[in-house]
Image (spheres, grey):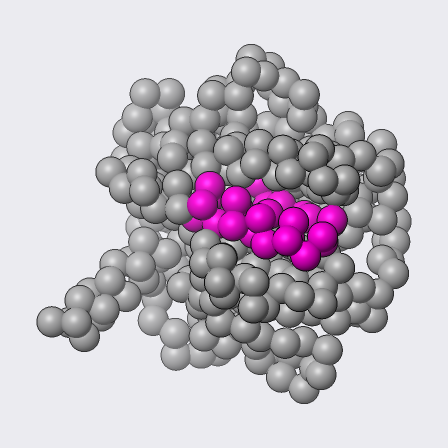
Amino acid sequence: MSIRLPPARTFVTGGAGFIGGELLALLLADGGEVTVFDDLSTADPDWSAPFIDEPRLTFVRGDAADPTALAAALPGHDRVVHLASGTDIAGGFGHPERDFVAGVVATEAVCAAMRQLDIRELWYASSGVVYGRPPRIPSAEGDGPLLPESHYAAAKLAGEAIVSGFAHLYGWRAFAFRFGNTVGSRSDHGVVHDFVVKLLRDPRRLEILGDGSQAKPYVAVRDVVAGMRHAAAVAPARPMTVLNVGPEGTLPVRDVAEIVTAALDLSIASVECAFTGGATVGGGGWPGDTAHVEFDTTALRSLGWRPSMTAEGAVRAAALGIAARYRSSRRPLLTAAERRAASLVAVGSTLG
Ligand SMILES: NC(=O)c1ccc[n+]([C@@H]2O[C@H](COP(=O)([O-])OP(=O)(O)OC[C@H]3O[C@@H](n4cnc5c(N)ncnc54)[C@H](O)[C@@H]3O)[C@@H](O)[C@H]2O)c1
């Protein structure tokens, strides 16, 4: 069931990113106006191509942790969607300040700017990783205590708490959406993207971080943004609503490898899978990897939302789309970590 929102003026931090691109299309289709506020730190250089002739879309380059930039760009909006954040969970190891600024400082700055202008609707991008190693699987929104296992997850959970404080004090209607592992053809990070890149480079060998047993809730990006819109349209008016957004069940990483391999017309039997083993306590693939995230999605389903694709279907469609994008462009075949490392080297040589 797809429910449209009444047209509104929406301010989307991080709107030039992967999930942002899909959300813009939806909000514009509803007849609204959208401002993308993004520092372009991890955005695809072509992010705006689908919207080039769209007069209802405005772009402002700015940092979501910068109160002055927010105060200049935010007036005139009815709603804020706060997506801006780094997504490099592994890269946070040894750099706790990155996730603190992205998750805590920026979220506080966005909320404070909203309060100044009396904007009262906020959709906050949280993550299933806030559950850490939860007391119950599948995990429901009311479960706790939540003990995050990475700086990224801790910052996401702190962001939820910041939003909740503002929402309760100032009469807001706020949502924290705990996304599953979101996949789509425009994804440029995450395991599906990285497996496609590795297999296009070498179809005979696939390095798999961890022991392959890590299990996550993979969800199509279009279902994620439809779920946000659906909840905002129909959820009862409360200061703060927290919702898991994903499928029921999970896929282990070794199954993701098999689905991606098949999508590329390869047989898993002919690919040498090189597992790096349980790199961390708990069997995750890297320090900070939350090895098992599984959602109880009763809350969002009871509002009438259903994902249009299974986790398997979402992963397969994403793998096909990502591969097609690389094959039809001159993009270098780099995993997300390799791309980040290359851009850091480029910045270093510019500065040097
Ligand atoms: N993709 C997933 O699987 C997933 C899962 C759970 C939660 N999330 C959350 O959803 C949100 C969007 O994720 P995504 O996958 O689209 O990531 P993305 O990296 O594609 O997009 C993030 C966007 O935010 C921008 N940005 C980063 N820091 C900024 C700052 N300080 N100021 C302004 N702009 C900034 C980047 O340039 C980028 O365009 C993030 O908050 C992420 O943590 C994503």
Q: Does the magenta stretch include residue 117?
A: yes
Residue 291, compared with residue 69, is above or below; it is: above
Q: Which residue, as the protein is rendered here, is positioned at the far left?
A: 352
Judged left or right of residue 213, residue 230 is: right
Instruction: Please tell me which residue lies in front, 342 or 183.
Output: 342
In this rendering, does residue 307 appear at all? Answer: no
In this rendering, does residue 56 appear at all? Answer: yes
Q: Looking at the rendering, in which quadrant would you find the C terminus?
A: bottom left
Q: Does the magenta stretch include residue 57?
A: no
Residue at 47% from the left image edge and 21% from the top image edge: 147
Q: Position of residue 177 (x, y in %)?
A: 65, 41
Instruction: Please tell me which residue lies in front, 304 or 14.
Output: 14
Residue at 57% from the left image edge and 32% from the top image edge: 161
Quarter assignment of residue 150: top left
Judged left or right of residue 75, residue 29 is: right
Residue at 58% from the left image edge and 16% from the top image edge: 144
Q: Position of residue 308 (x, y in %)?
A: 76, 49
Residue 323, compared with residue 46, is above or below; it is: above
Q: Where is residue 319 in the image (x, y as percent from the top left)?
A: 53, 57
Q: Which region of the structure is painted magenta? A: 102-126
Q: Which residue, as the protein is rendered here, is positioned at the far top?
A: 135
